[in-house]
Image (cartoon, grey):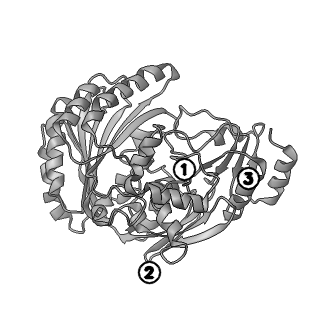
Amino acid sequence: MTNLADVSTLSTSIRGSVLLPSNPAYDATRQIWNGMIDRRPAVIIRCAGAADVIAAVRFARESGLEVAVRGGGHSFPGYSVCDGGLMIDLQDMKGIRVDPNARRVRAQAGVTWSEFDRETQAFGLATTGGMIPHTGIAGLTLGGGFGWLVRKHGMTVDNLLAVDVVTADGQLLHASENENDDLFWAIRGGGGNFGIVTSFEYRVHPLGLILGGLVAYPHAQSSQVLRGLHELVTGAPDELVAVGAMLTTPDGHAATAVAVCYSGDDLVAGERVIAPFRKLGTPVMDQIGPMPYTAIQSMLNDAAVPHRRYYMRSNLLDDVNAGTVDVLEKAYQKVPSPLTSVVLVSMGGAASRVPPDATAYVHRDAAYSLTIIGGWLDAVDDAANVSWLRETWDTLTPHLPNRVYVNELHDEGHDRVRAAYGAVYSRLATLKQKYDPTNFFRLNQNIKPA
């Protein structure tokens, strides 16, 4: 039972707000992106700055409350909110400062990628960010981060220069290559295990118009299209990222689409690079052309509309083999919801040339990230959709390496968490023991203290 006197004292000592279940804003605030998650914290603290985060951590320690940390609220398993504990909500922390001369950006932890891109693109700059604009910068960055610029500029963590982080003992530390460098190494891929990052400093790069869009083919051609995509991506320049997807069109037809982004300076050269992707089958739609980076950043938005019901599985791939494609093609013919999609994102390029132990994100040689995103609207359809996805994944698993991207890992057990970190897991566990020996930050893809 939360002590109301302690909560009252806390509310007078912070700049943000403290919400109890009786507060009119409580229900809207506790809702996160995945509509399947319905949890009720005892207390929500909407932080206005780093001082509020420090106060929230200290309050949780003194009260013995479990802590959930919300940035953008996109955690698939719902780690952004808890039952009966304290939800530390960062979504009001929206500060962004762009230094166009130094090509650096400082952004607070409540910023989303659409907000970040809007500010940086005002100066013709960008960095590798998520493909869904309402995703928060915090969670995506802490897990590694990839998107339309990953092959040209590396992972999001490869462009991270420094962070401010509140640790489990309520200290605010600055971490970079030159200060608390072991913490900085762990933050870059270690998720929320080591503290609450209140601000991020990124390197940004010049970026004007890109050449991008989507071409769609009949689903019956999916094997031909996806294996052809693999052949083209294998020899493509770093400026190109391609995404294959199985989806259902608005008029109810299954289709296989290829989305592309060419971020090079010469869009005429980009046309030559992209041309073969328009001939992988018999196109039923072609919407590729020059566009602002912010436009392609929102292109996949309909695959992740907030508050729908979601269930997912994901894995990293070495290639696109016949076994994987055949399973997906046959399974998607029986998909119970038209809102479900299969997404295959090309990796490699600059991200693959970073040494695997340079950051806590180790899967540098992965060629693709494969994700099945089950989406639907009504709770009565939960069983059918979850069962379809689990059965599909069970059939698919023999064709997959045991490697996964931590940001797209559902609640799948500790062995899969170890698979996300591979050879650096023991090093991370040692640093967890140093910075969070009681596992205070445990509502995450948890690394247990050594």
Q: Which corner quadrant of the image does residue 14 belong to?
A: bottom right
Name the residue carrying label 1: 448
Up-down: is 101 above or below 211? below
CB contact under 8 Å: marks 2 and 1: no
Q: Are marks 1 and 3 in contact (CB under 8 Å)?
A: no
Could you tell me which residue is drawn at 37 percent across and 24 percent down?
A: 388
Q: Is residue 344 above or below residue 100?
A: above
Which residue carries the number 2 mark? 101
Pinpoint residue 52: horizontal percent, then vertical percent. Answer: 71, 60
How much space separates mark 2 and mark 1, taking CA atoms? Answer: 42 Å
In the visual, does 165 lie left or right of 329?
A: right
Q: Type of residue at label 1?
A: Lys
Q: How many marks?
A: 3
Q: Which residue is mark 3?
A: 61
Give me the residue at 67% from left, 64% from top: 50
**Outermost residue, bottom direction?**
101
